[in-house]
Every structure is written in structure tokens, then in C-alpha cells.
Image (cartoon, grey):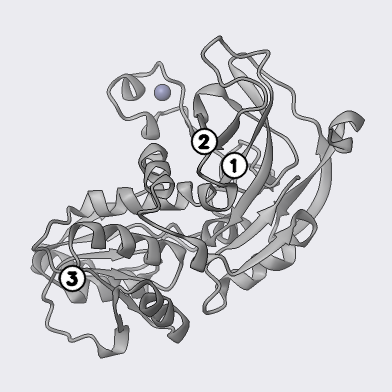
Amino acid sequence: MMMAAASGSIRAVFAAEGRVDVASRPRPSLGADMVLVRPTMALLTPLEREVARGLGVATGGVRVLGSSCVGVIEDASRAGPHAPARGTRVAVQPVFSCGRCERCMGGLAMHCGMRTILGIDDAAGALSELIAVPAAACIALPKELDDERAVFAIALARALEAVRRGGVDKTTFASVLGDDLLAVLCTLVAVEENQLARLVATSEATLRIGEQFGIRHRALHETGRRGDQELVIDTTGSAETIAAAARMVRPRGHVVVAGISARAPVAVDLSQIALDEIELHGSGFGPVGGALERLTRRAIDPSPLISRRIGLADAAKALATLGEPGVFSVLVQVTR
Ligand SMILES: [Zn+2]
């Protein structure tokens, strides 16, 4: 049994005004239909770095970081009979919706008007020794899927959504533009449909990981300026990368902006998008169930994308390394 849980105060990774620190917080209390989860592993990704830089900052600005975790249900006493029982290993789907509004009823729960996103909005994030989350957000993990792979489900779900938004089939000329975790995962998902899908990156380390996964890869400066791609997925979300994506795509082609950046709004020359009649799509969070299914049957093995393994106390320092070439994600052991 964990000592912190008994003492009433727990450790968590806080971001406030550009600073990231490990500090204590009160043990979270449970509302109706909520469960208490003890995260075992969380993943630091570029999304956490952007939140620390101010993405989605609410008034006050102090937040607990972490949008991806797996953990164990510690208390399900406030949830209904269909909630996962105490002791169940779960992944937490990070977009919490109301389940009752018009959007939720119409199949757009990810876009619920009352949603909060774990580790981004008001919901205290997963880099915490205990979190209170809606029971409906917990997905039980199969025995054969270990924590180290399951914790990639949230990032992989974003990749699935980005590829779905772009619409890849066997004949699509598709490129994924980026140097981060999401870029590699998007390419791996696109390759399931079309083996010619390629990763276009600027850093040597990203191109090497493309080599390691056996996917087509190309340095951005070596790509032609012909504008021949039918689909380009941009995983950075900066003015430069969106402009580069628009140059790579053919007239009437599709650009998916999947990069979520704290530095938005970005300035993009929209006249080229108008003249070339380019279709621009946004892409956010995706179906965690589909991601878990792929990870369980090992269709995608994310382990080469783990750059470091650390404990909660080192999370602040590790977050700063996420901008470095070849650092795709950092695995955090939150509790044992
Ligand atoms: Zn709703």
C-alpha cells in the first residue's frame, strides 16, 4: 500500500508560469460517477511540453501535467455497477465529456461543449500519485498488454484520428511532416493502409528512427517542390510547417494539422491555400480503444520511441529534453 495515500497528501508535477515543479497536493476527492486511479506509468510527450508553455491555460494558470497514463483503480465506491472494479488495470481516455448534451448524443463526445481534457484544461493531469477521473473514461487493459506499451494509447489514438481525417487508401500519395512522437506514429498508422506513406523530417535522429521502423523517410530539404502529395499531415502546428505542408500537397489536396502548439495563433499565407484549393483539416484526440487493440496485437510496437525512463521526481528536468532531436517520449514511473 502506498504511504502517500494514507497520509492524505500526494506528489504531482505542476506547471505554472513557465516553471515545472514536483510538489504535494491534497488527495483528490471523488464526485458521483468518478473513480480514483493510481497512475503507474505516464508518458511525457511534446503535448506536455506545450501545456507547460501555456497551452490551454485557464485563469490562475497552475495545472498538474500529464494527458497519458495507465494505472490501477483504487476506489470505485462512487461509481455505478458497470465501472471497473478496484484493482483493475486501466488506460484513461483523456477527453472527459458530459455524456448528455447534443454533441455527446450525436456521436461527438470528443467535442462535448462541457468537456475537460486531462492535463490540459481544469482536470488535474496524470503526473500525480492519484487522480479522480470519470469511471466512463477508464478502459480496462488486457493481461497481455503491459503498461510500457499501453501508455502509448493516447498518442497512438491521436495518430489514428489524424490519418482518418486525411483519408489514406492504397493509392494515396501521403507524407507525414514532423520530427516528434506523433509524426512517427502517424506514419506507422498510414503505412497500415499504404506502404508508400512516408515520414518527412528535418532531424537525422528522426530519419534514423524511420529507418529502424522500416518506413519510407526523407529529409525535408530533399523533398521536391512539385506539390505532388495528395495528403500531408503536419504534426508540429507551426507557421513554417503548415506552409511547408501546403507546398508539398497538390492542388485540391488535403493538409491535416495535428500539431497542437502553445505558440498558436500562427501566421500562415492563406492565399496559396485558396489558389491551390487545398483542404485544411484539424485533428485532435482519437479513439483510444482502436489504439489499445493495435498495441495488444503488436501491430505497432512503440518501444523504440521511449527515449528515457524516469521517476516522478525527475519529470520537470526530463520535460525540457523533449525538444531535443531524437527525444520522442519519456516514460515516467509514477507509482509502483
Ligand atoms: Zn456533452
- Quadrant of the frame with the C terminus: top right
Residue positioned most to the front? 144
As drawn, the label of residue 113 is: none
User: Could you tell me if the residues under marks 1 and 3 are in contact, i.e. CB atoms within 8 Å?
Assistant: no
Q: Is residue 105 left or right of residue 46?
A: left
Residue 135 lies in quadrant: top right
Horizontally, residue 148 falls left or right of residue 156, namely right
Estimate the x, y position of residue 279 in percent, counting from the top left.
16, 57
Q: Is residue 221 left or right of residue 297?
A: left
Disc 2 designates what residue?
A: 141
Name the residue at 39% across, 37% down. Answer: 289
Q: Position of residue 223 (x, y in %)?
A: 23, 85
The residues bearing labels 1 and 2 have C-alpha atoms spaced at a distance of 9 Å
Say what amino acid the circle numbered 3 marks: Leu
Badge 3 element: loop
Report, in whole angstroms, how far the alpha carbon at label 1 lies from the one at label 3. 33 Å
**As displayed, is residue 225 above or below residue 232?**
below
Question: Could you tell me how far apart the alpha carbons at marks 2 and 3 are, in whole angstroms?
Answer: 32 Å
Instruction: List the residue tagged with mark 1.
Output: 70
Relative to 227, say whether 67 is above or below. above
Looking at the rendered structure, the secondary structure element under dot 2 is loop
Looking at the image, which residue sits at the far bottom? 222
Residue at x-position 47% and y-position 47%: 154
127 above or below 115?
Answer: below
Callout 1 secondary element: strand
Q: Which tag, 1 or 2, sits closer to the chain's start?
A: 1
Q: Which sits in the foreground, 144 or 263?
A: 144
Q: Amino acid at mark 1?
A: Val
Sequence-wise first label, 2 or 3: 2
The image shows residue 262 at horizontal and vertical percentages of 51, 59
